[in-house]
């Protein structure tokens, strides 16, 4: 099982109504059927996930297989070694295109790095799907 990276640095940033909304670039199709997608490491000093409530999720732009692929939030002390701190959903409905938006309550968490992880258990999602990841926080 390998991972594709959803890059926020090559995606877009918008600032509607006092929020910052970061959307990743669209991922490439997966190489292996059990591959996962992770966001690039998000430095908390620039995004302030710690102690905040955020809206985050994925936008399935090209459908994957019909499995119950989850979306989790992970934290790290160094931006390399990751631990899952919250499961946002156990079924992102990856076989349906469109947005899945979820609330992450980071008020109980403090970490220097965070990331989103789609299909962390390596279910067979196929190789044709593509997605974008996003997160929004109050400025």
Image (cartoon, rainbow, N blue to C red):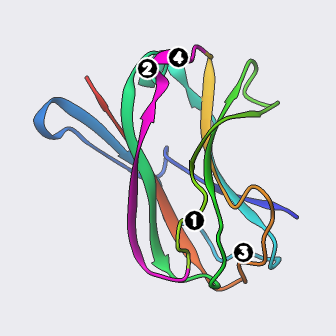
Looking at the rendered structure, which numbered label has been put on residue 48? Answer: 2
For marks 4 and 1 on the same chain, the one whose residue lies earlier in the sequence: 1
Element at label 3: loop
As drawn, 66 above or below 130: below
Q: Residue at x 63, y 35 (%)?
A: 41
Residue 25 shows up from this direction: no
Q: In front: mark 2 or mark 1? A: 1
Quarter of the view holding residue 3: bottom right
- How far separated are the C-alphas under marks 3 and 4? 33 Å
Q: Residue at x 58, y 13 (%)?
A: 110
For marks 3 and 4 on the same chain, the one whose residue lies earlier in the sequence: 3
Residue identified by numbered label 3: 30
Residue identified by numbered label 4: 108
Residue 77: where, in percent of width, then height? 74, 18
As drawn, 79 above or below 66: above
Q: In front: mark 2 or mark 4? A: 4
Find the residue positioned furthest to the left.
17
For marks 2 and 3 on the same chain, the one whose residue lies earlier in the sequence: 3
As drawn, 50 above or below 98: above
Residue identified by numbered label 1: 91
Quarter of the view holding residue 75: top right
Looking at the rendered structure, which numbered label has been put on residue 10? Answer: none
For marks 1 and 3 on the same chain, the one whose residue lies earlier in the sequence: 3
């Amino acid at each position: 099982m390998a991972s594709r990276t959803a890059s926020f640095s090559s995606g877009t940033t918008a600032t509607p109504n006092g929020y910052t909304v970061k959307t990743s670039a669209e991922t490439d199709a997966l190489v292996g059927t059990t591959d996962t997608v992770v966001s690039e490491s998000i430095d908390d000093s620039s995004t302030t996930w710690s102690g905040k409530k955020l809206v985050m999720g994925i936008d399935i732009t090209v459908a994957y297989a019909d499995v119950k692929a989850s979306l989790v939030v992970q934290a790290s002390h160094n931006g390399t070694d990751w631990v899952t701190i919250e499961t946002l959903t156990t079924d992102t409905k990856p076989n349906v295109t469109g947005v899945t938006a979820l609330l992450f309550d980071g008020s109980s968490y403090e970490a220097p790095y965070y990331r989103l992880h789609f299909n962390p258990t390596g279910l067979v999602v196929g190789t044709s799907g593509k997605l974008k990841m996003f997160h929004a926080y109050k400025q």
